[in-house]
Amino acid sequence: MKFHCSVDVRLKPGLLDPQGKAIEGALPAMGWTNVSDVRVGKHVEFYVEARDQTTAVAQVHEMAERLLSNPVIETFAIRGVEAFAGLTFEDRP
Amino acid sequence: MTRRPRIGVITFPGSLDDRDALRSVRFMGGEGVPLWHAEHDLREIDAVILPGGFSYGDYLRTGAIARFAAVMDEVRTFAARGGPVLGICNGFQILCEAGLLPGALIRNRQLRFVCRWVDVRVESSRSVLTEGLASGEVLRVPVKHGEGQFVAGAGDLRRIEDEGLVVLRYCGRDGAVDDAHNVNGSLDAIAGVRSEGGNVVGLMPHPEHAVDPDLGPTGGQPMFASLLASALARV
């Protein structure tokens, strides 16, 4: 079975986020003076071929832990692991 | 005649400073041994350098993909046996990602790439990079990085400081550590750290660009001399 998976990776709360700060700095010039604590993370999407959903979730968890995030500075959350029946980008002729 | 220490330099896809590292090893009297990331072979070296550059385009996180290269299995084993391992810039980032050094390196505080000469102060002589150097000694070396801000969780940082794992800090010419000389906003102005055993060291500055007096300051000379001496001690 094919599963569509997505994982969010975020910088840990205590760490300074220079990218977030830069965005925050640009907003007041555009008129938005009421924005604070901007933080930038990553959203990763992919497909996994697996026997069942439990197997797919276990694999996504391990992938997120070992490669997609660095536990020293980041946390991750699995946003979805859903059975997918359609064509993926790579399946298209 | 004493044997010259064999210092391996690993080339990853995207490494830039492997040639300079090899040249500096030769300049300082060692034998430079080129190593390839995809090979499970360290060619009987006495020390290994992970050079600077942008392995795998810095995609995902700096060093995140290079840490899974085949050669890294051998580096891990070599380090566990006490072998001297030096990570410079991207090499430092790879060693942190591999968990061989504490902490991590993120985007510079000022969000800009920084390329300039800096002064660093020796904090610990218990490392293969600073053996024979006195604490407080100031060395001039260049930096050139966009993601060199050293960070660690509060607990990790306390352990790094308490156990004396800081090897180098950014400082002024007189050795004073202050925010103005902290080129990338690193926590506690940390420029380099070591493993508990002292045989694995990582630093953001580039000692390999500072050994030849014809090309400028030579703050890298004592660091390479220390690495070569540590490697020779294993021969």
Image (cartoon, coloured by chain):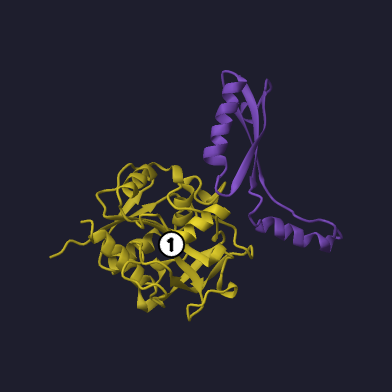
How packed mark 1 is, by other alpha carbons closer than 10 Å (few <14, some 14-19, many 20 or more), is some
Query: In this rendering, is residue A60 above or below A20?
Result: above
The reply, left or right, for residue B71 in relation to residue B188 is left
Residue B211, x across and y down, in percent: 36, 72
User: Disc 1 sits on a residue from what chain?
Assistant: B
Q: Amino acid at mark 1?
A: Gly
Q: Residue furthest bottom?
A: B174
The reply, left or right, for residue B232 in relation to residue B37 is left
Q: Is residue B17 visible?
A: yes
Which residue is rendered at x = 62% and y = 43% of the image? Answer: A75
Q: Pick the residue in front: B203 or B214.
A: B203
Which residue is rendered at x = 58% and y = 31% of the image? Answer: A60
Q: Is residue A93 visible?
A: no
**Letter of the yellow chain:** B
Rendered-image quadrant of the C terminus of chain A: top right
Which residue is rendered at x = 56% and y = 69% of the image? Answer: B183
Query: In this rendering, is residue B84 above or below B23?
Result: above
Residue B172, x across and y down, in percent: 51, 78
Element marked by disc 1? loop
Residue B25, x across and y down, in percent: 31, 64
Q: Pick the residue in front: B179 or B228.
A: B179
The hue used for chain A is purple
Rendered-image quadrant of the N terminus of chain A: top right
